Image: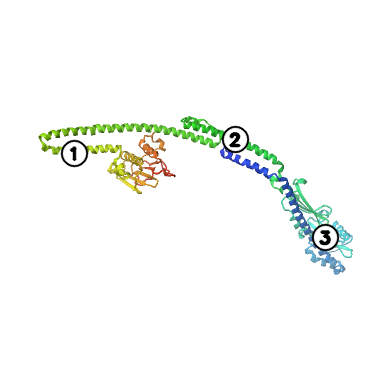
Amino acid sequence: MARRWPGLRAWLRSLRAQILLWTLLPIIIFLLGLSFTDVYGHQEAMHTMVQERDHSLVQSAAARIAESLESNSRLLSSLARDAAFREAGPAAQGELLGPLSDIFADGILVVDGQGRSHAASRPTISWQQAPFVAALARAALEQDRPAYLGRAESGLAPFHLAVAVALPDKSGALVGVLPLSSSAIAEAVDGLQVAPEAEAVLLDSQGQPIYRVGRAAGEASATPLPNEALVTTSLPVPNTGWQLVLSEPWHRLVPLVLRYAQATVLIAIAAILISLLAVYFGLRYVTRPLQELGQEANRMAWGDFDAVLTPVGGVEEIADLQRTLREMASQVRSYQAAMRNYVAAVTRAQEEERLRLARELHDDTVQSLIALGQRLERVQKAALHRPELCAAQLDELRHATRSLVQDLRRLIGDLRPTYLDDLGLAPALEMLLKTVPSDCRPELTVIGPERRLSPDVELAIYRIAQAALKNVAQHAQARHVHLSLSFEERGVRIVIEDDGQGFSPPSSPDELAREGHFGLLGMRERAMLFGGWLALSSQPGHGTRVEAYLPTVDEPGPASIPPPAWRPEEYSGTIGDGQG
């Protein structure tokens, strides 16, 4: 089966199929037991109901047949009792029979006791010399009531009816023949076919069929059903000696579940076996693989990323989950490697920054202080001999001191922006934009009512903007840079856009360290440190857009809006396309 129907086997091993089997099979078993507790009693009730229905139908049809026969015989009897008819000659009698030809379409004969014809409704009648004429006339004279015949074996044409009525003086009889379709017999028997498999038969007094409809009439080669599979109803047709029989196959009248009630036990046993098989498959392909996968996940949590490489088997969903864990382990490894590179880069950057600050303090500030001290000594000496020169020298010292203070403030600003603590985030960003070359035409937009944030959040936003503007100044070659600061209800958003040359960002943030984008990685880590995110959009020749969002509230609910795509297919900036 595995080779012929691999899809079926995969479906049976899926968790969906297992859950269906576990839930549906017990319900099916319960419903089977509930349905078959009174099945045999229900069969009897159905059998009785069908018999009563068929009895009513057959009784109504028999009465209708009797009424039709009586109507036909009444027409002949009324003519036979007419004195003018009895006294008329053969030719006149034939003319008097003419009006009844509309009913007795095959003709009417006036015969004597031996069946010899005296008069006819028309000159030529095909059945005039048939044997049944004399027999039917004698039967009418002997019984002193109408006689009927419908069997084709006696010489009567198929599907025709012969009616004989004795003359009042017993000297002869009137015999008329008409198609069954002209009477209500065929219509009454046809109406008994309540189902395609039902059979209705009209039998004469000798048990020979007169007219039948249904299974035996339309399917001569059909295999007869056993007697116990039929529901048969038989009633006599009043005043005729005929019988009307209706038979229906019992197995077609009951529901399928009742028809095969004997197989109830086998069905229940099969359902139980299938349930046990489903439980076995559940234990083998769901429970045990999940336990093994849980153990592997626990080992992976402790740093053993190779643990998830061992297959655990099970249903397809568990295999998909294990593949996802493998991908997760690979991503965690890649992220750890990236973080190691980032930490190393940050450490190098810190050491380089310390070295730069030490060099600037030594080569600039310290040397300036030494030179300032030496000049003060000269001013001190000059004050004793040439006091008129002190004013000019002191003015030079004042300018040198101011320049030295500005250099110190610049170094202090690199370590900690004083504007951020004193004035707030928006003024600090405005001052930061002044460090961008003027040919970039920097612009700041503040959206929403300004408010002070926590010092850590303000510093993180400032550093993200500082790193982004540094990249613009060093790499973008932009003609316009726009910084947007939005104070939102639950957070703060900053967007830095430029119309520079752009670049091809990595496909995922984890590749930033491998490609040397440590500045972008540091910006992202700062945003994530406060529960926020950073999104990057860029294409060569179409500028760059950096967007960061940091939540500012700790209330229940989402603290940040989910970030947009890391690398959209098309740049969605708003300030230019890098072409001028």
- Front position in the image: 378 or 252: 378
Q: Amino acid at mark 1?
A: Arg
Say which label, 2 or 1, has the lower sequence index. 2
In contact (CB < 8 Å): disc 1 and disc 3: no
Residue at x 16%, y 33% (from the top left corner) = 377
Say which label, 1 or 3, has the lower sequence index. 3
- Front position in the image: 268 or 137: 268
- On the question of residue 242 being in view, the answer is yes
- Front position in the image: 569 or 102: 569
- On the question of residue 3 being in view, the answer is no
In contact (CB < 8 Å): disc 2 and disc 3: no
- Between marks 1 and 3, how big is the CA–CA gap? 152 Å
Circle 2 packing at 10 Å, graded few (<14), some (14-19), many (20+), is some
Q: Secondary structure at mark 1?
A: helix
Whole-percent x and y of residue 480?
31, 45
Circle 3 packing at 10 Å, graded few (<14), some (14-19), many (20+), is many
Q: Amino acid at mark 3?
A: Val
In-image side of 345 versus 5 (left or right) = left
Q: Amino acid at mark 2?
A: Phe
Circle 1 packing at 10 Å, graded few (<14), some (14-19), many (20+), is few
Is label 2 or label 3 in front? 2
Say which label, 2 or 3, has the lower sequence index. 3
Q: Quadrant of the N terminus?
A: top right
- Between marks 2 and 1, how big is the CA–CA gap? 91 Å
Q: Secondary structure at mark 3?
A: strand
**Residue 558, relative to residue 66: is it above or below?**
above
- Front position in the image: 490 or 149: 490
Residue with the mark numbered 3 = 163
Residue with the mark numbered 1 = 398
Whole-percent x and y of residue 467?
33, 39
In-image side of 27 versus 368 (left or right) = right
In contact (CB < 8 Å): disc 2 and disc 1: no
